[in-house]
Amino acid sequence: MKYETVIGLEVHVELLTESKFFCACPNHFAAEPNVNTCPGCLGFPGILPQLNKVAVQKALTAALALNCEIALFSYFDRKNYFYPDLSKGYQISQFHVPIGSNGYLDLEDDQGLLKRVRIGRVHMEEDAGKLVHSPAGDTSLVDYNRAGVPLIEVVTEPDLRSPGEAKRYLEKLKSILQYSSVSDCKMEEGSLRCDANISLRPVGSDTLGSKTELKNMNSFKAVEKSLEHEIKRQRAILNSGDEVVSQTLRWEENSQETIVMRGKLQAHDYRCFVDPELAPIQLTIEEVEEARQNLPEMAEARAARFVKDYKLPGYDAAVLTASRSLADYFESCLAIYDNPKAACNWIMGEFTARLNSAGIEVDRCPFTPHFMAELLKMIDDGLISGKLAKEVLDQSIASGKSPSQIVEKENLTQISDHGELEKIIRQMIAEHPDSVENYHGGKTKALGFLVGQVMKETKGKANPQLVNELLLKTLEG
Amino acid sequence: MNLKTISAGRIADKVNRGELKARDLAEIVLQNARELNNKLNIFCSIAGAEALEQASAVDQKIEAGICLPLAGVPLAVKDNFMYKALPTTLGSSQFKSFYPPYNAAAVDKLIAAGAVVVGKTNVDNMGIGSTTLDSPQGPTLNPGDLQKVAGSAGAAALAAGICSLALESDSGGALLQGASHCGVFGLLPSAGLVSRHGLAVHSGSFCRAGVSALFPEDLPVALKVISGYDPRDAVTAACREVNTRRDKTDDLSNLVVGYLETLSGSAADPRRNLVKDTLNRIAALGIRKAAVQLKHLPEALRAHQVIAAAEASSSLLRYDGIRYGQAIEAEDLELLYRKTRRATFNGEALNRSIFGTYFLSKDGYNRYYRQALKVWTLIREELKTVFEQCDLLLMPVVRTGPFLASGETAYSDLLENDLFTVPVSMAGNPALCLPAGDINGLPVGLQLIGKQFEDAFLLSAALKIAPAIISDLQGFNGGGN
Amino acid sequence: MADVSIEELIKAAEIAKIELNEDELARLLAQLIAYKKWLEPLLEVNCSAYEPLLFGHGALNAMREDKAEQNTLQGLGYYAANYEDGFYLVPPIIE
Ligand SMILES: [Zn+2]
């Protein structure tokens, strides 16, 4: 039988704030356990929640960017359950009235056609801590650094039809949330987490089959892989005439398979009710409209602007704007360097390649846009060759030193001094009379050999174009 | 010095003028506290050096020319308010050596105003209850009758003459009932007027901080010290915009005091007569009376029970033995939770943890919880209507006298106990319990209820009315000494 | 009330994670039966004209500025029964 895949995604995104949702603890990654904790996020008696204004604003921004209807009046509920990473025994979450609902996101389906993925809700909630299991298995360790970090949960309707669509949805969501400064969406660091609901149904059927929930995917690729794996697994079950058991599965990256989860995440009665310790949120229409007006330019609009203003090819503009940080990098570079095409080529090519192989994020790379502009200017001024520039780039990324510091220290500046070069050229001509003869005999290849010899003599620092020019002049003259 | 004959205001005056050293007073008071505590079981812990240091600090400030509104005033603090210097037991044996790392907002403010913390007063397990029968150290005895409970250990500390002020909490009537049973003045301020930061809140909707005193004139001073917006308690944001409300009464003849035309049949007769007598005395001052109705008192009581249990079942989930409190060792997490939580809770806290879990389950929510929330709306509407007909409402505080200290009380009596105190709890109004007479040799109070955030008006009116009700102040303070 | 069962009570105790022995269960069951009977008048009120109350307090939009402050209280781990190398320890959990 032919089956259709039905996928819905629940994405948790950490909001970019200075402090946590309900206490003043810093909201940033900490290497040491439990350093970003206080009596509030540790659930000590007598500490009441204090709502972070910026977290609410960012959630509103996200809901607007995802085309949601905004609940002018919303509030927080308590979702009650026991787990050691949950310090109060309940999670503060918007259960009854999410700040955003009935949104959507448009993307390309597998046939390349535009499709609309409905977003059922965008709601705010606090994160839980983290559990680490001791290698010996005799104890579990709890770290509450992440407890109380502000999150939004973005829930799609079951509108996705393939793992590829799911991946594109995530990429689009990430881009929008990054562009609107809602989150840095770093899946590897856990600031974006994705759970997937997946079921199969016979093509043409409009009832949903029984679904499984997939967890623990640590990259977009893992989401795609786990969904592909789950489709195969469910299809095999259905083909053999069995029924898919509705359960939560955990993706194992090492073995590339799913296993059934035990513990907390099985069905629960969360006993949700209004948290009486927090004040509800009342937004005015004016506030919402202002937030809507202030939505930043998103990827598509920015790419269009790059094409128009910087005369970049559409493909290049799309690559540069795929992530906000790369597009920001490009434009920061252009603020002090005025050749967009050259900057674009270097950023998309050499720079991105090095970031990828080193696994560094653009915004954490020591090679700043300022350095890039400096490097490009040195090439334009003929101070270094393109080849040398790549070396300088490597060294600068490794050491954090500026290109000019490196060029100066390593004495890498190109020899563009005519007198000096003419001296070397005359010396090479004297040493290779055969080549000179060959050249005059019509063998133009000999010219290349002689240029090579000059470059070798200067350890590559000669300006190759100038050498070519001067050599021709000497030979012909 | 007999604290029963001198108000907190006069103590502060003497200390501010240098006529009395706070430190000298503290030494006497602590000695007195230790002696009387053996008899009455008022304190979970009595301060020592900390109190003397506080008193000395007050004396130094006075010498430096600073004037403090509560200079040297001996203060009792209920043991569900966090106070760094002494253990905060929350009425649980699992917390007997829990020294919190921070002070409650109200404690900080009272200390800054010059008060000296004499000790932490006995509390029902997790602060839930109005008898102290659910305390691991047993109930606090009523200074007026040692066979009976005091209801509130703070009120007992006042009635016994150990302290001049008591910092109290209330979620269904503990503060007012305790004041009634002990013959002291108890003020339950409007919901949202006093920060609950550092109070172990088990019901976000109903828990409030308040204050009791031996002399009514001390209440406005104490209230001024502890009230006001505190960003650490979101609910206090409600009091930011209310400074335009009435704050004093100039002419008693403009005042209308409402009374319940039909008291619930369960109210014992002497209490009904007490209201009648009091009304007559008030009328003699020129104040007008107005008969009003609260038709759904019994239903409100039940709704309050359901909501309070539901909220407690959630708020008490944090006591899991992992981050603080004593944990019962277990190899398995489930057992750790179950044993630790069993050891932490007893009495009403245990009941609410379980019944409240049921009220929030799908079944219980649809059947009880949602209905309770509707009745909550209803009783607030009724009170709103009442206050369209009067400025203040006078009604009983307690249904019966204090329970037996032996704990032999019928479950149904316990359930009915908060009948007259839940309306205020549910509607957020301020209420003042003032001693109004004696029944069977024990003091009995009545409550004057005001509109929300008209606490100052309520106090101002009450101070004018009080002399007519209380002919002999000293006579009301039980028989502590 | 007929619908009070020991199973209901046991389930609630399990969710609340409180260990109860036979005697306690029996006492609580008796109380729950009495309690539910006592609650009956609540269910009889006609509340069709009333909405459930969401908040007992009138506070609205109580929010703080987004300023981070490193907690200055040292040694909160000291309050835990089992705390080692900066971690809170619990019996092993299998996910
Ligand atoms: Zn914190």
Image (cartoon, coloured by chain):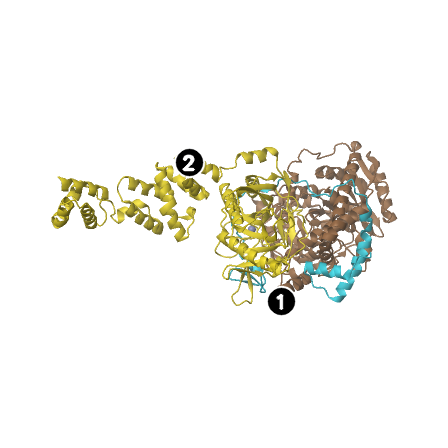
Instruction: State whether residue A345 appears in this view.
Output: yes
| Label ID, residue B330 | 1
B270 or A150: nearer the viewer: A150
Is residue A385 left or right of A104 when viewed as pictured? left
Q: Colour of chain C?
A: cyan
The quarter of the rendered structure image containing the C terminus of chain A is top left
The shade of chain B is brown
Q: Is mark 2 within 8 Å of ligand 1?
A: no
- Rendering coords of residue B105 (x, y %): 62, 47
The chain under label 1 reads: B
Tags 2 and 1 on a common chain: no
Residue located 14% across and 40% down the image: A476
- Please provide percent x and percent y for residue A133: 54, 63
- Expressed as whole percent of the image width and height from the top left, the position of residue A176 reads 51, 42
Which one is nearer the viewer's eye here, B283 or C14?
Answer: C14
Q: Which residue is mark 2?
A: A307
Q: Is residue B470 visible?
A: no
Q: Position of residue A400 (x, y in %)?
A: 35, 49
Q: Regarding mark 2 in the picture, which secondary structure is present there?
A: helix
Mark 2 and mark 1: Cα distance apart in space: 66 Å
Residue A470 falls left or right of residue A157: left
Q: Which quadrant of the view contains residue C6?
A: bottom right
Q: Colour of chain A?
A: yellow
Q: Residue at x 59, y 57 (%)?
A: A234
